[in-house]
Amino acid sequence: MLPCFKTNNVTLSLNSSETSKWLDAHYDPVANLYTFSSCIALADLHGDGENKLVVGDLGTGSCNMKLKVYRGTGLMSENTLLDLPTGLVSFLMDQHEPRTPAIAVASGPFIYVYKNLRPYFKFTLPPLEVNALEQDVWNQAREDMIDPLSLKEMLEGIRDKADVPLSVRSLRFLMLDPQDTEAFVNLHKAQPIRRQTVITCIGTLKKNMADEDAVSCLVIGTESKDVYILDPEAFTILSKMSLPSPPTQMDVTGQFDVEFRITVACRNGNIYILRRDSPKPKYCIELSSHPVGLVRMGKSVVVGCAQETLQGFTQKGKKLWTACLPAPVTTMGVMDLPTRGFQAVLVGLANCEVHLYRDKNLISTIKTPDVVTSICFGRYGREDGTLIMTTKGGGLIVKILKRTAVFDDRDSAPGPPLAQSIRLNIPKKTKLYVDQTMRERENAVAMHRAFQMDLSRLRLAAARAYVKALESSLTPMSSSLSEPLKMNAVVQGLGPSFKLTLNIQNTAACRPVMNLAISFLYDESLYSMKTAFFKIPLLVPGLNYPIDTFVECLSDKGISDIIKVFVLREGKSAPLLTAHINMPVSEGLVLN
């Protein structure tokens, strides 16, 4: 638990607004941390159940590159790095007790492995193939068979036509001014030519078990368009895969000995998916703009693009959704809470905001004092839901998720309703469906004509029935403009006696209706009524007039019938309106 953090610069308590889902645990604007999400990790380095923050600090870009470890809010240790770090991961490399993870830092062509915060091993990428023509030209220069000017012309010709790129030495030589070429050749001509690539991204892959404390392999992407999987103990290359373009970001899932997927965002703007026993990409996702962020959430891949959009794809590259963002994406991360079964995507934006997305729905927004450059969510110290961010100005922000925080799946951003984004569960096509589809295609014109004919007949029959009902006043609403009436009936009781209530209303605007009467028509062998005909008082517009009468059931056979109600006008033979009342079965006679 992190109750309250203090620094020499800023002190922030955990008292935040009641509406906030996060506790402001710590903010140090002058922490001098310059890093990205790929160079930050949380790991239990000493096996004491307390996670530390491990950061690969870029420093100024040319010096002061360091590996820093934070405990709480204080700097616990730091190690100097020889080159800029391109990635940092924590992984378990063996089964030895105590189970403490190692830290792997990718820098240039090397991977520096730290165990117990001490240098443990350095892995070097294998050298690349050297261009044979380039090798021959430098051999001639070493034997003084050609002068530096001829060497430069020959190397320029090789660079334009050769399939194998030139080495760094040759490229640096071609950049020199003519007066400096001779000294450069004399200095380097006796040394062998080497062509070395560099690491662009790094990840981890479980070896043979999916447990959280299982041994993991290192997965590295290189500038030479290759992806290597390294053995965690011997650091030998277990597998090598090729890509059409240099990788920039990657996400790894699965186990090396069973099945795995490596999702790689490349410099050509595409995303490739590598699988086990396949040296080439299995699927390709073509984007409309370059990817600047890549995370995996469940079985979907979420990509942040340079055109201020967030896009979701399936594992096979099918596009699921697109969400527009208010500002360019600076970094992305995954918010995973296994105890709550909750997963979401954290997106840092250039407008000093961090958006929390679940699928395409924006469920929370975090305001930050500066632009966020790296995001890491997980267990820090002994607190599970900790969000750690670094800013563009070198600041460090630590927030803790409240235990009472609840995220609504509804989209807080304006737009279409949530139901519109729910995918329909469409069943698979059956043989009967395919046969019916072919039949409809072949007989489309005849089927349409038959449908139109049946529809016209149905409309005609409905219109005739409606006109007949109006002419014979068989509807519970009057069609007369002079006496606009509406009537409904309610039957109460179990029998043999029933109470029949008629509600009559004058729907005219301002004209009353008078001289009306009500008559009942029924089967006299089944029912009897004391009064089958009575007059209605004057009906004022808008008021409801209830008229009660009692009906006695005479049959003991458990049958029922219809009672017809007519509203009549003096001097007219046709009723103004008619109602048919379906009488219930008399329960009293059945029981007797």
Image: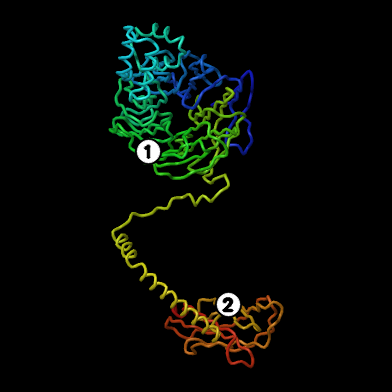
**In the rendered image, is residue 233 in sight?**
no
Q: Say what amino acid the circle numbered 1 marks.
A: Cys
The one nearer the camera, 587 or 56, is 56
Q: Give the camera-side residue of 247 and 544.
A: 247
- In percent of the image, x 37 and y 15: which residue is there? 122
Q: Position of residue 387 (x, y in %)?
A: 53, 30
Residue beneath label 1, please? 284
User: Which residue corresponds to mark 2?
Assistant: 488
Where residue 257 sits: x, y (%)?
Answer: 29, 30
Identify whether 433 is placed above or below 139: below
User: What crowding class fits label 2: few (fewer than 14 Cα within 10 Å), some (14-19), or many (20 or more)?
Assistant: some
Specify the farthest residue to the right.
510
Residue 199 in percent (x, y) is at 40, 22
Q: Closer to the camera, 45 or 27? A: 27
Q: How many marks?
A: 2
Q: Secondary structure at mark 1?
A: strand
Q: Label 2 amino acid?
A: Asn
Horizontal relation, residue 152 to residue 19: left or right:
left
Residue 433 in view (yes/no): yes
Q: Is residue 502 above or below residue 360?
A: below
Q: Give the secondary structure at mark 2.
A: strand
The quadrant in which residue 518 appears is bottom right
Which residue is pictured at 40% across the width and 44% down the height?
318
Q: Earlier in the sequence, mark 1 or mark 2?
A: 1
